[in-house]
Image: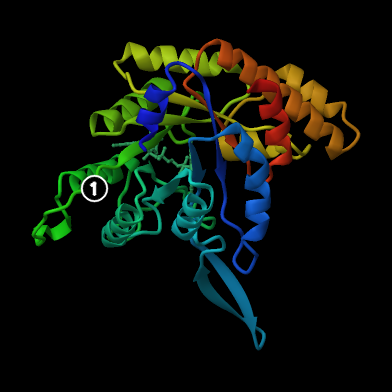
């Protein structure tokens, strides 16, 4: 079922969902299931599965470094299919511009359609680690909006190169990313919102936000989005802080601010067990306030671990 239909069916009740990352190449999928199992009691209508970009690795061979390109966490679509089958839940693969040609994207979308996947998250992806800026893959898309356009074309039965005799069409519901504290590359929040509106106008059906730790940022973002005519659901993304290093890492990677009170609480902690508890309590407080504001859904970034998400969900749902 489409995300928008799940939201409609819930009739104002806030739903619970989460995002997982595929295991590293060579690791057993059971560990992933062990982290999903405890969260199923909260009845997520869907689970998102992230996609990792390819990366450069150097392998030492007879004293020389050999450059190879590899994807360290492959398997997004396979995991979507496996989880859909195992738990009877909708799964949402993240589809990226970076690292894929338009043709590869088309094949991926056709696989999604055959697997009965109704939703896809259309994202640009980040630059490769060794690159300072995002560069479009040869034959790939530059912005997420171009991906939304390709998916919408497929929904209309328009394939690439227009050589297909079509008697079956996909009907993907499309999610896109939104940034309450603006995307790192955007010159201003208002410009970023304009870009978001363009993605919606091109056919995206809902927005999932980047993590934020101050609900006011989300409320202001939604108000500003509504003001420029964005009417689709805007789903808040919540991440519980779990290690002290997040204090530097999260602002650096995601260009987000952390509230002073939260920073002070984390700095007082003697170990990461205490940090984890602070992170859980902060997320509970955030979630309860968002729930009271009747957000359609609370979407948690699990980063492959479920114990903290379960502790939060138990208090909130
Ligand atoms: P876009 O919407 O293309 O925007 C990228 C930048 O370009 C923005 O600054 C925007 O303002 C600007 N822009 C857009 N259109 C134009 C235009 N026409 N001209 C000039 N500027 C423009 N990354 C992964 O690698 N894998 C994942 O699974 C993944 N999942 C994510 C899930 C969520 C909910 C979120 C919020 C992010 C996720 N990301 C993921 C990260 C995401 O790929 C990065 O944040 C990426 O840098 C931007 O992606 P986007 O889809 O927002 O890009």
Quadrant location of ligand 1? top left
Q: Nearer the viewer, residue 217 or 46?
A: 46
Q: Quadrant of residue 206?
A: top left
Residue at point 43%, 47% (across, down): 94
Q: Residues within 10 Å of mark 1 (few under 14, many from 20)?
A: many
User: Percent position (x, y) of residue 248?
Assistant: 70, 36
Asked if residue 117 lies left or right of residue 269, the reply is: left
* Vertical side of 95 occupied by 239: above or below: above
Q: Secondary structure at mark 1?
A: loop
Kindly tell me whether mark 1's CB lies below 8 Å from ligand 1. no
Q: Nearer the viewer, residue 159 or 262?
A: 159
Residue at point 56%, 55% (across, down): 22
User: Percent position (x, y) of residue 251?
Assistant: 63, 33
Residue located beneath label 1 in the image: 170
Q: Residue furthest right?
A: 270
The quadrant of the rendering that contains the C terminus is top right
User: Percent position (x, y) of residue 61?
Assistant: 63, 85
* Vertical side of 296 occupied by 104: above or below: below
User: Percent position (x, y) of residue 146?
Assistant: 27, 44
Asked if residue 193 lies left or right of residue 55, the reply is: left
Residue at point 16%, 52% (across, down): 168
Asked if residue 188 lies left or right of residue 65, the reply is: left
The quadrant of the rendering that contains the N terminus is top left
Q: Nearer the viewer, residue 53 or 38?
A: 38
Q: Is residue 241 visible?
A: no
Q: Quadrant of residue 112?
A: bottom left
Tally the marks: 1
């Amino acid at each position: 079922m489409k995300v928008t239909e799940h939201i409609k069916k819930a009739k104002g009740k806030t739903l619970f969902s989460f995002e997982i990352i595929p295991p590293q190449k060579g690791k057993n999928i059971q560990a992933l299931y062990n982290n999903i199992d405890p969260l199923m009691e909260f009845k997520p209508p869907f689970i998102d599965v992230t996609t990792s970009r390819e990366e450069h690795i150097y392998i030492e061979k007879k004293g020389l470094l050999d450059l190879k390109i590899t994807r360290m966490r492959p398997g997004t679509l396979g995991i979507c299919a496996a989880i859909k089958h195992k738990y009877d839940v909708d799964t949402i693969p993240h589809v990226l511009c970076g690292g894929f040609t338009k043709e590869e994207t088309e094949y991926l979308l056709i696989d999604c359609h055959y697997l009965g996947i109704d939703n896809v998250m259309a994202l640009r992806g980040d630059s490769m680690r060794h690159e300072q800026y995002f560069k479009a893959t040869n034959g790939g898309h530059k912005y997420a909006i171009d991906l939304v356009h390709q998916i919408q074309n497929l929904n209309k039965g328009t394939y690439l190169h227009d050589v297909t005799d079509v008697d079956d069409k996909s009907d993907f519901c499309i999610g896109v990313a939104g940034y309450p504290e603006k995307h790192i590359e955007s010159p201003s929040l208002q410009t970023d919102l304009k870009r978001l509106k363009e993605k919606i106008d091109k056919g995206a059906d809902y927005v999932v936000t980047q993590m934020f730790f101050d609900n006011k940022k989300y409320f202001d973002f939604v108000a500003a989005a509504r003001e420029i005519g964005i009417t689709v659901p805007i789903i808040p993304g919540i991440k519980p802080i779990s290690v002290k290093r997040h204090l530097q890492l999260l602002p650096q990677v995601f260009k987000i601010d952390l509230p002073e009170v939260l920073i002070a609480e984390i700095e007082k902690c003697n170990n990461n067990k205490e940090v984890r508890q602070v992170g859980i309590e902060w997320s509970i407080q955030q979630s309860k306030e968002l729930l009271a504001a009747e957000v359609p859904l609370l979407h948690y970034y699990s980063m492959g671990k479920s114990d903290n998400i379960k502790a939060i969900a138990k208090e909130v749902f």
